[in-house]
Image (cartoon, rainbow, N blue to C red):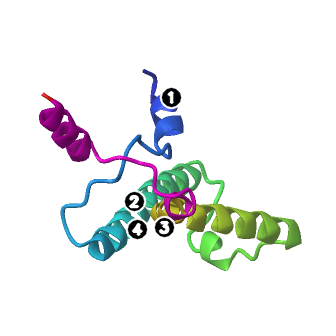
Amino acid sequence: MSFADALAGAGAKPAGKRPYFLEPQVERVLAITMAMAQELAVARQRADTLERLLLAKGVLTPGEIDAFVPDRAASAERQMWNQEFIARILRIVQQENEAAIGGGSDVASGEVGEELAQEG
């Protein structure tokens, strides 16, 4: 599996019910927090790389990034990205809502094991 394939599948919902090790509300907050931390870490590394490369090549001067004011088109693109970002962060809430609306047909793996044990 390529790195691109792994990234494409990162948002996919696994089969069955989500396993919870803590209270569901705590798990939800933890999942959201960890998703945000991961997004922030990647963004920070990329921004740092770009700034270092641009400064080293003399394309930017120190402080130029902080002084930048985006135009209308850039602001619109940033706003769209922010909406997509929030959707990724709140993915767990969306999946739980979809499961609740869908009638909760997902089955936890433990339930399948118990059912098979009773049949045997």
Q: Nearer the viewer, residue 17 or 103?
A: 103
For marks 4 and 3, the one nearer the N-term is 4
Q: Nearer the viewer, mark 4 or mark 2?
A: 4
Which residue does the numbered mark 4 point to in the structure image?
Answer: 32
Q: Which mark identifies residue 67?
A: none
Q: Which mark identifies residue 5?
A: 1
Q: Nearer the viewer, mark 4 or mark 3?
A: 3
Q: Name the dominant secondary structure of the magenta segment.
A: helix
For marks 2 and 3, the one nearer the N-term is 2
Cα gap from disc 4 to disc 1, whole angstroms: 23 Å
Question: Does residue 68 appear to the left or right of 11 in the view shown?
Answer: right
Q: Quadrant of the N terminus?
A: top left
Say if mark 4 contacts mark 3, CB within 8 Å: yes
Say if mark 2 contacts mark 1, CB within 8 Å: no
For marks 2 and 1, the one nearer the N-term is 1
Give the SS element for disc 2: helix
| Whole-percent x, y for residue 88 in the image | 54, 59
Which residue does the numbered mark 3 point to in the structure image?
Answer: 93
Which residue does the numbered mark 2 point to in the structure image?
Answer: 41
Badge 3 density bin: few <14, some 14–19, many ≥20, Cα 10 Å? some
Q: Nearer the viewer, mark 3 or mark 1?
A: 3
| Residue 102 highlighted magenta (yes or no) | yes
Cα gap from disc 2 to disc 3, whole angstroms: 22 Å
Give the SS element for disc 4: helix
Say if mark 4 contacts mark 2, CB within 8 Å: no
Badge 1 density bin: few <14, some 14–19, many ≥20, Cα 10 Å? few
Which residue range is magenta in the image? 98-119
Q: Nearer the viewer, mark 2 or mark 1?
A: 1
Residue positioned 77% across, 63% down in the render: 77
Q: Nearer the viewer, mark 2 or mark 3?
A: 3
Cα gap from disc 4 to disc 3, whole angstroms: 9 Å
Residue positioned 49% across, 54% down in the render: 52
